[in-house]
Image (spheres, rainbow, N blue to C red):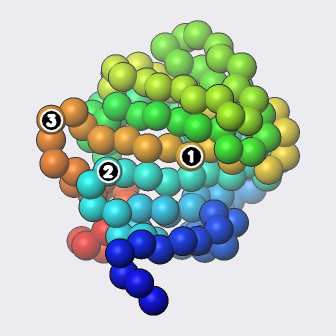
Amino acid sequence: MDERYRTQRLDDIPSPIDTPSGAPEWKPIRHHFDVRAFGVNANVAHSVGDPVVEDHTEIQEGCMRHEELYLVTRGHARFSVAGETIDAPAGTLVFVRDPEARRGAVALEAGTTVLAIGGEPGVAYRVSPWEKKYFGAAG
């Protein structure tokens, strides 16, 4: 296999955790490919009304002041960012620059999938504490 690149279907990336009912299934893309330059993961909501992006800020414990870009790759989501509601069908990008802005999203269709890419501006990427919890110090 050529080590200069890899491919993988998102659906075939296994989640390292058993997801409780109503929580999104986590697809650890960064870890799977050993991406070192930025954070990238995906979440899959299995039922309508389930969260597909957990409600959070990037300044709370375990977060790293990331700017985050979300892409709805499948389904339909409703985002809430800094108190504003954003309708996000498949193909919609939602960029959150402010790490203090509270954000989250719920699925409006079963199987809604959201890709999340993040990093702290001007800082070399570091594995987040929450990811280390599942994969150890190397993340």
- Residue at x-position 37% and y-position 56%: 130
Asked whether residue 86 is in view, the answer is yes
- Which of the image's four quarters has the N terminus? bottom left
Q: Where is residue 99 in the image (x, y as percent from the top left)?
A: 33, 26
Q: Toward the viewer: 111 or 132?
A: 111
Q: Which amino acid does label 2 sit on?
A: Phe
- Mark 2–mark 1 Cα distance, whole angstroms, equals 13 Å
Distance (Cα) linking label 3 and label 1: 22 Å
At x 50% / y 44%, what residue is drawn? Answer: 116
Q: In this view, does 110 lie to the left or right of 23?
A: right
User: Marks 2 and 1: CB-CB under 8 Å?
Assistant: no
Question: Dot 1 corresponds to which residue?
Answer: 115
Q: Where does residue 17 sit, x and y in percent of width and height? A: 57, 69
Labels in figure, total: 3
**Which numbered marker is on residue 38?**
2
Q: Residue 122 carries which label?
A: 3
Of the two numbered discs 2 and 1 on the same chain, state the one appearing first in sequence.
2
Specify few, some or many for label 2: CA neighbours under 10 Å numbering under 14, 14-19, or 20 or more.
some
Q: Badge 1, how many Cα within 10 Å: few under 14, some, many 20+?
A: many
Q: Which of marks 3 and 1 is nearer the N terminus?
A: 1
Q: Where is residue 55 in the image (x, y as percent from the top left)?
A: 54, 33
Task: Answer with mark 3 or mark 2, whichever residue precedes in sequence.
Answer: 2
Going by the picture, which residue comes out furthest to the bottom? 1
Q: Who is closer to the viewer here, 19 or 125?
A: 125
Q: Give the amino acid type for the residue marked by disc 3 in the picture.
A: Gly
Q: Which mark is residue 21?
A: none
Amino acid carrying label 1: it is Leu
